[in-house]
Image (spheres, rainbow, N blue to C red):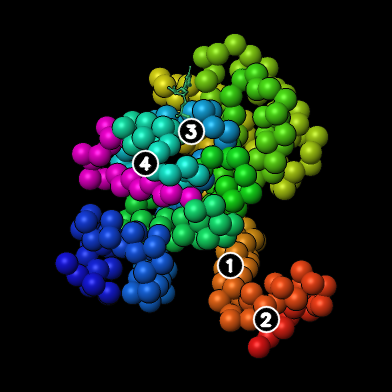
């Protein structure tokens, strides 16, 4: 099988096995694939990068499946990236995801990829969006990225999306309310899924009040929709709302916000690795532990040399 630029050409040209290998190379930080990043980036066809996030069990995977079906109806080729914090082989949820996604497996216009989160802030977020960029280069548009909105690493993934859909469910407990507040900050579109359950309208009303009160990132608060992912009800209007957000996401201001986040993540991650890779790392840790140097001066010393 092809390597280097030939691998990229094959992947972009519709060879699914080559694309799968390219994505594995991105995920594993294969140095040969690292050299292809400028070309992958240059080969972008401008796919809409959509994050789907929300608490565990909210119906994100079911919704991604329903969204995919709706996008297919509209003649679009859909890339799917599922990020799960648990290992892909031990986590029950991701196995379920895989089985459910199988119904699309035979469709050549759909490409699905699961990523095992290594839990490193920046690392997983960057790798996820590089995988999305490769799917974009291969002609998939939109690329839907499912993440569990549970922690900081997952929020970072959401922050790198062009359009972030936050999935909520009716009548969540207090604990979830806290997650909800954090998540809503990154929402461009909100959907109250499981709208077949009691209290969906009321939850949507509460969310509307929260968002109106919060001021939010934008002048206009994000639209709040109701969906039943299991039946597909409300999914066409959700696609319409995601499509409508594309214009906002593509404004030069928003593109710069996203670019800044990408750069910031890359800088943080790369300086962390550079510092950790220094032979002085362990001795510096000891110096700090023994109060012989402060952490800031130590960090400057590690990064400046
Ligand atoms: N009643 C109802 N159940 C749903 C709906 N959407 C998803 N579910 C169910 O909720 C459970 C969790 O769904 P899943 O997509 O795995 O959630 P995720 O963890 O957010 O990806 C599954 O049993 C789904 O069948 C819905 O709209 N209504
Ligand atoms: Mg899921």
The image shows residue 293 at horizontal and vertical percentages of: 81, 77
> Which residue: 34% across, 36% down?
98
Q: Which residue is identified by label 1?
A: 269
Image height check: is 11 above or below 281? above
The magenta-colored residue range is 101-117
Marks 1 and 3, how far apart in space? 28 Å
Q: Which residue is identified by label 3?
A: 60
**Other-residue count near label 3 (Cα within 10 Å), few / some / many at <14 / 14–19 / ≥20:** many
Question: Which tag is nearer the camera, tag 4 or tag 3?
Answer: 4
Verify whether residue 106 appears in magenta: yes
Find out if the beta carbon at label 3 lies less than 8 Å from the nearest ligand 1 atom: yes
- Tell me which label, 2 or 4, sits earlier in the chain: 4
Q: Which residue is identified by label 2?
A: 302
Q: Secondary structure at mark 1?
A: helix
The image shows residue 59 at horizontal and vertical percentages of: 49, 28
- Tell me which label, 4 or 3, sits earlier in the chain: 3
Q: Quadrant of residue 148?
A: top right
Say whether marks 2 and 4 touch (CB < 8 Å): no
**Other-residue count near label 4 (Cα within 10 Å), few / some / many at <14 / 14–19 / ≥20:** few
114 vs 238, left or right, is: left
- Rendered-image quadrant of the C terminus: bottom right
Marks 2 and 1, how far apart in space? 15 Å
- Tell me which label, 1 or 3, sits earlier in the chain: 3
Q: Which residue is identified by label 4?
A: 89
- Tell me which label, 4 or 1, sits earlier in the chain: 4
């Amino acid at each position: 099988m092809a390597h280097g630029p030939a691998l990229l050409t094959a992947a972009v040209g519709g060879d699914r096995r080559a694309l799968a290998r390219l994505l594995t190379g991105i995920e594993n930080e294969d140095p040969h694939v690292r050299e292809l990043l400028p070309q992958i980036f240059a080969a972008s066809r401008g796919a809409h990068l959509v994050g789907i996030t929300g608490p565990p069990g909210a119906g994100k995977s079911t919704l991604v499946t329903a969204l995919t079906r709706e996008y297919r109806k509209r003649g679009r080729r859909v890339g799917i990236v599922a990020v799960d914090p648990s290992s892909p082989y031990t986590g029950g949820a991701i196995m379920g995801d895989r089985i459910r996604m199988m119904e699309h497996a035979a469709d050549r216009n759909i490409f699905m990829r699961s990523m095992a989160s290594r839990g490193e802030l920046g690392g997983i977020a960057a790798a996820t969006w590089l995988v999305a960029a490769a799917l974009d280069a291969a002609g998939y548009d939109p690329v839907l990225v499912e993440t569990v909105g549970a922690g900081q690493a997952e929020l970072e993934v959401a922050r790198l999306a062009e359009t972030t859909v936050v999935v909520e469910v009716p009548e969540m407990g207090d604990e979830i309310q806290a997650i909800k507040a954090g998540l809503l900050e990154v929402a461009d579109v909100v959907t109250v899924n499981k709208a077949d359950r009691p209290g969906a309208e009321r939850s949507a009303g509460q969310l509307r009040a929260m968002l109106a009160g919060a001021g939010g990132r934008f002048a206009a608060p994000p639209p709040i929709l109701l969906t039943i992912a299991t039946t597909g009800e409300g999914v066409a209007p959700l696609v319409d709302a995601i499509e409508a957000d594309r214009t906002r996401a593509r404004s030069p201001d928003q593109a710069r916000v996203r670019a800044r986040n990408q750069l910031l993540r890359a800088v943080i991650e790369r300086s962390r690795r550079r510092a950790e890779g220094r032979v002085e790392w362990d001795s510096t840790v000891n110096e700090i532990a023994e109060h012989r140097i402060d952490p800031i001066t130590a960090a400057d010393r590690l990064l400046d040399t």
